[in-house]
Amino acid sequence: MSTPRDQSDDRRVVRVLLLGGVPLIVTVGVVVLLRLPGGEPAPAPRGTAMTPSASPEPEDPTPFRAGFTDVAAECGVATPQLSAASGRYLLPETMGSGVALGDLDSDGDPDLLLLSYGSVPALYRNDSPPGGPIRFTDVTVDSGLDSIAGSTTAAFGDVDGDGRLDLLVGTIGPDRLLVNQGGLRFREVDRFGDGWTSGAGFVDVDSDGDQDLVTCSYVRWNPEIDLEVDYTLDGVGRAYGPPTGFGGTDLMLYVNDGSGRMLEQGGERGLRLRRSDRSVPVMKALGLAFEDVDDNGGIDVFVANDTTPNRLLMNDGAGFFSDAGARLGLAFDIDGNSTGAMGIDTCRDPASGRLMCAIGNFANEPSSFFVQGPGGGFLDRSSVSGIGAPTRPSLTFGTLFVDLDLDGFVDLLQVNGHIEPRIERVQAGQSYLQPAQVFRGGEDPTRFEPVAPEQLGDLATPIAGRAAASADLDGDGDLDLVVSRIDEVPLVLRNELDPAPDSVLRVMIEDLPSAPDGEGSTVLVLDDDGVILHRLRLDRTRSYLTQSDPMGLFPRTEPRMAAAVRVVLPDGRVLRSVIPPEGRVVVEADASENQATSTP
């Protein structure tokens, strides 16, 4: 910000102008010319954020090849995810319920679990014939899930090492740990906590070969606190408000003792963060993601916090954590502010391996896009990435990096919808129902182009959108989507890309103890010259209230012909395979020692 001049300064300026005459005018003209395009640009004032403008549309853009059709009605998904809204305007009613996709019956295709704060979960078995129409059958009754109230999110993982996906159901109240009995039936074995679980994921934090559990909570909430906050929209009557009137929470870490028994150790392992001025929790978490940021073998934890600093809990390799969010540049936006952070996802540049992180934010805030630099820290590049200005009006929840059009470049999906149904009354240009947005990736992994809504089909339907999960539901080689919305049946979005079978590479990892589908492994796809074309860490815990199917699905011929696959297992072993003509690579994680080498 500039400092105002006093009156003596103004008088001196006038005297100079009168005495300088024509020479001064010529000088000013030269300066102006230098600032025109082609001249040396003047530096922006330090500490001042420039408002980004939308990137110009290309004159002749290549059509986005993926389009989406909502097939929920014809595929058998008919359960609305209810908010329990009763006119009291309580905060949980507007935050939505989650979606989880994973192969729960071990038959090779992803099943569907819908959480519901206002009712009970719904479990659907995937009965889709390969390459045929998407088909689901409701198997909730007698599944062991049909009496759980107030569910918000879920996590899939194999806690007992039997090769089947077990299940944590997060609630507002005690979370439920259920062991898979086979046949899509589950048995409750434990209950954890009593808060508002907003994210959960199974991950081996201590590198001992079994899956531990991380959960996060939104705010310290009960109806009495909510009614005391008494937020209003226009000064008359109650409305849904921000989390600023509620206390913070802690991350919880349940360490697997090897037998499937989970012991809470978050405090002793560094996950109990407190304010510097008083001992109160600091998290208001809505999104979790896992990555080994510094390549030390320990899985680190990203946390997207609503109105408080985002956190990056760095793992020392043995399962003990320290917060490096501020030090590494992820805690705040480019202006040094905390944002209304919701969904989160990460990906890596195939060539350099540098990490990128996207976070969906509240309305009137652009989505955050952080890019890792050479020193390991992150820079907020949202304003120059192509996503800054287009995402500013939207309120974003679901956030996914995913190659929707199988062109070899990762796209960014953001699912939107406001929290206040009456927002139009007080904010011009805002709406409760909002369309999703897709930003198309290209050769520069830090730059994106908005995809026109008319190219997205039913994905662009205005909704009160919340969770977004991806999987190949029909086995045709492209990634479909399931998107939850408030008080509605979710959108089951079939991807109409329909690639030719020989144009798709599938990588499956089998026999990895305690990690079905190879979760936690990194897949690298290389060309004949050994150049890395694709790099993907297989993770379920991404986005917002979501578990996605960790699928290794890649184009075979874009951007160049794929020739080989290298898989880095969670224990550091590296397995290699040449791609066969049919493009289907099955990696056996218990392969002989001569197939394993050190991590590159």
Image: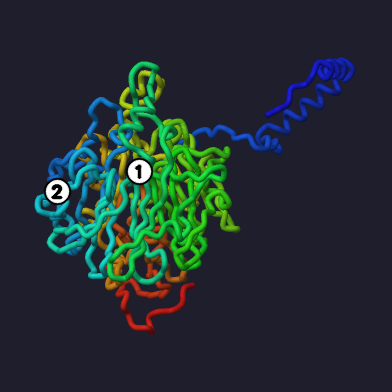
Residue furthest to the right: 19
- State the image coordinates of residue 203 (x, y, percent, origin top left): 36, 61
Along the line of sight, the residue nearer the viewer: 123 or 208: 208
Residue 146's label in the rendered image is 2
Number of numbered markers: 2
Looking at numbered disc 1 in the image, what kind of residue is underneath it?
Gly
Disc 1 packing (10 Å; few <14; some 14–19; many ≥20):
many
Q: CA distance from mark 1 to mark 2?
A: 26 Å
Q: Quadrant of residue 528 in the image?
A: bottom left
Relative to 232, residue 222 above or below: below
Along the line of sight, the residue nearer the viewer: 418 or 317: 317
Does 310 sit left or right of 71 as displayed?
right
Please name the residue that numbered disc 1 is placed on.
398
Residue 178 seen by the camera: yes
- State the image coordinates of residue 214 (x, y, percent, origin top left): 37, 56
Does 181 sit left or right of 220 as displayed?
left
Along the line of sight, the residue nearer the viewer: 457 or 96: 96
- State the image coordinates of residue 191 (x, y, percent, origin top left): 26, 54
Q: How is this picture coloured?
A: rainbow
Residue at 35% from the left image edge and 32% from the top image edge: 225
Disc 2 packing (10 Å; few <14; some 14–19; many ≥20):
some
Does 587 sit left or right of 149 as displayed?
right
Q: Quadrant of residue 477 in the image?
A: bottom left
Assess whether mark 2 and mark 1 are in contact (beta carbons under 8 angstroms).
no
| Front label number (1 vs 2) | 2
Label located before the other in sequence (1 or 2): 2
Relative to 568, residue 51 above or below: above
Looking at numbered disc 2 in the image, what kind of residue is underneath it?
Asp
Dot 1: what SS?
A: strand
- State the image coordinates of residue 197 (x, y, percent, origin top left): 33, 46
Dot 2: what SS?
A: loop
